Amino acid sequence: MKYLKFLLVGIVFGIVLVKSEAVSWYRIYEMFRFQSFHMYGIIGTAIATGILFLQISKRSKIKSIKGADIFVPKKEKGFTRYIIGGLIFGLGWALIGVCPGPMYILLGTGVYSMLIVIAAALVGTFIYGLLKNKLPH
Amino acid sequence: MEFLLNPWPWYVSGPLIALVMAMLLYFGKTFGMSSNLRTMCAMGGAGKFSDFFKFNWKDSIWNLTVVLGAIIGGFIAVQFLSNDSITDLNPATISELTALGFGNSGETLVPNELFNLEAITSIKGLAILIIGGLLVGFGTRYAGGCTSGHAITGLSSLQGPSLIAVIGFFLGGLLMTNFILPLLF
């Protein structure tokens, strides 16, 4: 039962991403052609709300369910991995229109060919694991 | 009810995505969808090939549960919360896509030209989905996160590395949509 809350969070996530059309290939295309404000509006208000939440929880000392501070782990310092890795992801994101959340959500909406994308993404992650020590980070 | 069945405006959707992040933080976890790919590799025995996959994947079952929920959420959204409205795309986008050979833009969430049976049984169509998936799986792990981990969580917590990653996402996306896609179609 301790996992039920995570199932519910996932359900909310899936519904929001479909209803916002953030899982739409066309919306991603439109965003990268600067032909619509829609995706920028979604990402922008998500970040703005997120900043507000994290700042308020820091100042008002809101605790997590476990009684600890609300905490986002710090990303490792670096440049190469973020810019190159990010660029590679961006190429894939714009080609097939999905990132690692929507690939599952779209599967749920009935796009079964997404299984091919998920399998390929697993292989991509596996290849990264094999090459990790040889790549600049 | 009509407002629930219609597509939701960006100013409602964005804060709801932040709510997903906030709920996970409240439960003591961090919002990051691409980590699940690493977890599934570890479950499948990838630890035999790389130390990168040697970790206790049972600690990540909560995140796989989020994935399961996301699949169910997608199902619920199209089965019970939709009225078959068409994505309100910019007419310029639609005419561009028509010129590239994409018909009925916005009537579905993903183009039939990329995802239907005919597409995935052609060599080109199958190659596009596989290459796209490889780029997403490799790139997100190299960058240490995706749209949820870097763009939403990382930028909300004002982290420099996430800003670099998001700039990378956009450079890659702009390159693909503006220069490579027109060559492919």
Image (cartoon, rainbow, N blue to C red):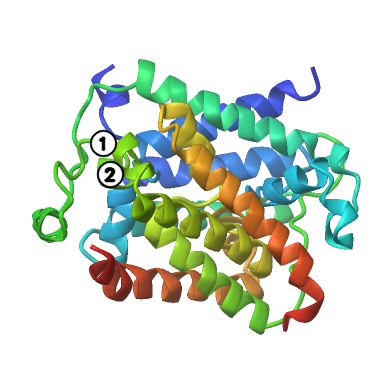
Q: Which of the image's four quarters has the N terminus of chain A?
A: top right
* Secondary structure of the residue carrying numbered label 1: loop
Does residue B27 lie above or below A26 as drawn?
above
Which quarter of the figure has residue B105? top left
Which quarter of the figure has residue A29? bottom left
Give the residue at x 77% y 72%.
A132
Are dots 2 and 1 on a single chain?
yes
Q: Classify mark 2: residues with Cα within 10 Å, few (<14), some (14-19) or many (20+).
A: many
Give the residue at x 26% y 46%.
B113
Q: Nearer the viewer, residue B94 or B25?
A: B94
Marks 2 and 1: CB-CB under 8 Å? Answer: yes
Residue A125, position in %: x, y? 68, 58
* Secondary structure of the residue carrying numbered label 2: loop
Q: Is residue A51 left or right of residue B24?
A: left
Q: Callout 1: residue from which chain?
A: B
Residue position for label 2: B111
Residue A17, position in %: x, y? 44, 39
Distance (Cα) linking label 2 and label 1: 7 Å
Q: Nearer the viewer, mark 2 or mark 1?
A: 2
Does residue A85 lie above or below B64 as drawn?
below
Could one spot residue A41 in this view of the protein? no
| Three-letter amino acid code at the position of disc 2 | Pro
Does residue A81 lie above or below A54 as drawn?
below
Q: Is residue B156 left or right of residue A48?
A: right
Residue A34, position in %: x, y? 25, 67
Residue position for label 1: B108
Q: Which of the image's four quarters has the C terminus of chain A?
A: bottom right
| Three-letter amino acid code at the position of disc 1 | Thr
Q: Is residue A113 left or right of residue B7?
A: right
